[in-house]
Image (cartoon, rainbow, N blue to C red):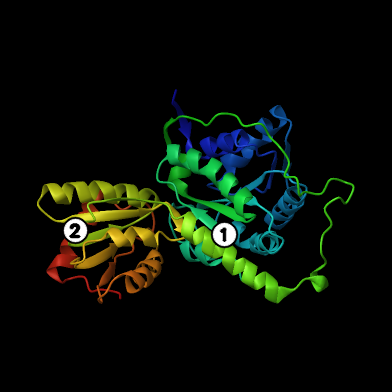
Amino acid sequence: MADMMKGNEAIAESAIRAGARLYAGYPITPSTEIMEYMSWRMAEVGGTFIQAESEIAGINMIIGGSACGVRAITASSGPGISLKQEGMTTLSDEQLPAVVVNTVRYGNGIGTLLSAQCDYLRETRGGGNGDYRCIVLCPSSIQEASDLTVLAFDLAEKYRMVSVLMTEGALAQMMEPCELPKMQESKRYPWGFDGKYTNKKIGIFDRNSMTEAVELNEKYNTVKANEQRWESSYLEDADYIFIAYGLPGRATKGAVEELRAEGHKVGFIRPITAWPFPEKAFSEVNKNVKGFISVEANATGQLIDDIALTVKRTQERNIPVYCKPHVYGIPSIKTIKEDFQKVISGEMKEVY
């Protein structure tokens, strides 16, 4: 039975039920409720909660927990996630699974407390040094955030890599009905440290980086082939296709329904995985499509780059791609429809 839950609390409880037994992090708005919830809930299930002295210390504790075979999770926002990047590169280098929740807030530097989608490029490109990617999941509802939290742990374990749950400030703070997942039995990964050095580690100077690079590409290609997720509708006859994720994706669906009721042939693609980007969805697109429209809650437009690259890869002709960034918050159905009118009237020019 579904209960009314705040987004952050649904994510935290879903992580517990997915078998997470270590939370280490540092408080930051708008993700703090995840940490507060874990501070008492972890003790109830025999797990470990640590309020670290910094975001850097928190992610390094996650490295230690994961290396010992424990399902581990941390959460932060904006500059806190930036501070965690070196630890995330280490997790990726050592092929250690972990879940990192980024409750995105708007702004450069220390930023603001406003809900936004301005971290897309960092999360989908690997925000630290080196050749690596993280699986990035983008919920548009609290129920989906709960479901994707469980999936994040499963994918992290399956591919031995970091899964990022990229939510938004508004999703973290709002309340909706949510049916929580069943409680899983917690277990340790068999390859983790066990105090006996059963699973020996290969030192950095003894590793073959050329061989590892080939294996890494093979793994990422497997992820791209098998783990693309999206929601779409009306692609087969659409003259224009909207693309948006998260809460703007939810509003975009509403705008598409209203526009179709008014006689406009439009469709939508809502990426659920930002990485791997759902290129396969574009194979269903009307061959005579006139344009793609990116709907984003940031200042510069970031999702549009992946849209344009995918259009170039999948379409046989040059098709314009439009973008009207909405800075922060959630663009309304009315605003999205107004932007569409600017596209078809020629007032809004394509970006690509």
Q: Amino acid at mark 1?
A: Cys
Asked whether 74 or 273 is in front, the reply is 273
Q: How many marks?
A: 2
- Viewer can see residue 30: yes
Image coordinates of residue 198 in percent, x first then y, are 86, 50
Q: Amino acid at mark 2?
A: Ala
Mark pair 1, 2: CA separation: 32 Å
Image coordinates of residue 1 in percent, x first then y, are 44, 22
Q: Is residue 132 left or right of residue 60?
A: left
Mark sitting on residue 134: 1
* Element at label 1: loop
- Viewer can see residue 129: no
Mark sitting on residue 90: none
Q: Which residue is mark 2?
A: 238
Q: Is residue 22 left or right of residue 217?
A: right
* Element at label 2: loop
Residue depicted at 27% across the width and 48% down the height: 253
Placement of 60 over or under 213, stated as above or below: above
Mark toward the start of the polypeptide (1 vs 2): 1
Placement of 318 over or under 102, stated as above or below: below
Disc 2: CA contacts within 10 A as few (<14), some (14-19) or many (>=20): many
Disc 1: CA contacts within 10 A as few (<14), some (14-19) or many (>=20): many
Asked whether 342 or 186 is in front, the reply is 186
Residue depicted at 25% across the width and 46% down the height: 254
- The image quadrant that residue 21 belongs to is top right
- Whether residues under marks 1 and 2 lie with C-beta atoms below 8 angstroms apart, the answer is no
- The image quadrant that residue 34 belongs to is top right
Query: Looking at this rendering, what residue extends furthest in the top direction?
Result: 1
Q: Quadrant of the C terminus?
A: bottom left
Image coordinates of residue 168 in percent, x first then y, are 46, 50
Q: Is residue 340 left or right of residue 92?
A: left
